[in-house]
C-alpha cells in the first residue's frame, strides 16, 4: 500500500489488525522498527510539568534494560530539523531506528508488565507517532 493515504485511527497505538499481523507472522528474521515521533509541547499524565521530549527521554532510559533483555538495540536516533522534500512545516521531531532479533522478541518486550508500566512515559510525551516494521535492505547489516 505504498503511497496510499489511509485515515489515522489512533495516533499512538496499533489497531487490532496491525497487532494480529505481527503476532500471526511466522517470519523469525531480524527487523528494524522505524519510529517517527512528534512530541507534545507539554507532557501530561505521569509526566505533567515536563516537555513531551523530556517525557519520551525518560521512557527511553527506563526501557533500555527491556530492550537489551530481548536482544534489541538502537541503531540510530536523530532530531529532525528541516524539510527538504515534502511539507514545509516539520512533521516529525525525531526518528529512531531500533533493531530486534525478530518479531517475537519485539512482542516479548512490549508485553512485559514492567515495560508496560514505563510505556506510560511514552504516552504522556507523544502527540503522534508512526511505527514502521522494516528489514535491512541492499544487503545491509547492522
Image: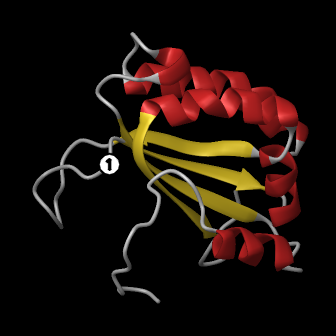
Quarter holding the C terminus? bottom right
Nearer-the-camera pick, 37 or 101? 37
The answer to whether 89 appears left or right of 73 in the picture is: left
Instruction: Locate residue 101, reporting x and y percent.
Output: 84, 58
Q: From this viewpoint, which residue is outermost toward the top? A: 49
Q: Based on the displayed image, in which of its 4 quarters is residue 135 positioned?
A: bottom right
Instruction: Locate residue 51, reporting x and y percent.
Output: 36, 19
Q: Based on the displayed image, in which of its 4 quarters is residue 112 positioned?
A: top right
Q: From this viewpoint, which residue is outermost toward the left? A: 88
Instruction: Locate residue 85, reporting x and y percent.
Output: 17, 66
The answer to whether 77 appears left or right of 84 in the picture is: right
The answer to whether 38 appears left or right of 33 in the picture is: left
- Above/below status of 88 relative to 119: below
- Above/below status of 7 relative to 59: below
- Above/below status of 53 relative to 104: above
Nearer-the-camera pick, 79 or 47? 47
Q: What residue is shown with label 1?
A: 92
Q: Based on the displayed image, in which of its 4 quarters is residue 62 positioned?
A: top right
Residue 135 visible, this angle:
no
Q: Residues within 10 Å of mark 1 (few under 14, many from 20)?
A: some
Residue in the image at 34% along x and 33% along y: 40
Mark 1 element type: loop
Report the number of numbered marks: 1
Residue in the image at 73% along x and 77% along y: 21
* Colour basis: secondary structure
Residue 38 visible, this angle:
yes
The answer to whether 55 appears left or right of 100 in the picture is: left
Residue in the image at 20% along x and 49% along y: 90
Residue in the image at 72% along x and 65% along y: 31
Amino acid at each position: 500500500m505504498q503511497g496510499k493515504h489511509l485515515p489515522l485511527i489512533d495516533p499512538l497505538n496499533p489497531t487490532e489488525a496491525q497487532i494480529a499481523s505481527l503476532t500471526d507472522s511466522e517470519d523469525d528474521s531480524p527487523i528494524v522498527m522505524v519510529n517517527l515521533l512528534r512530541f507534545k509541547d507539554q507532557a501530561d499524565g505521569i509526566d505533567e510539568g515536563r516537555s513531551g521530549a523530556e517525557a519520551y527521554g525518560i521512557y527511553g532510559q527506563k526501557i533500555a534494560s527491556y530492550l537489551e533483555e530481548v536482544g534489541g538495540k538502537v541503531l540510530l536516533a536523530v532530531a529532525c530539523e528541516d524539510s527538504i522534500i515534502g511539507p514545509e512545516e516539520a512533521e516529525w521531531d525525531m526518528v529512531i531506528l531500533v533493531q530486534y532479533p525478530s518479531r517475537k522478541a519485539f512482542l516479548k518486550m512490549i508485553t512485559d508488565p514492567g515495560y508496560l508500566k514505563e510505556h506510560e512515559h511514552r504516552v504522556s510525551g507523544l502527540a503522534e507517532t508512526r511505527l514502521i516494521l522494516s528489514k535491512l535492505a541492499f544487503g545491509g547489516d547492522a
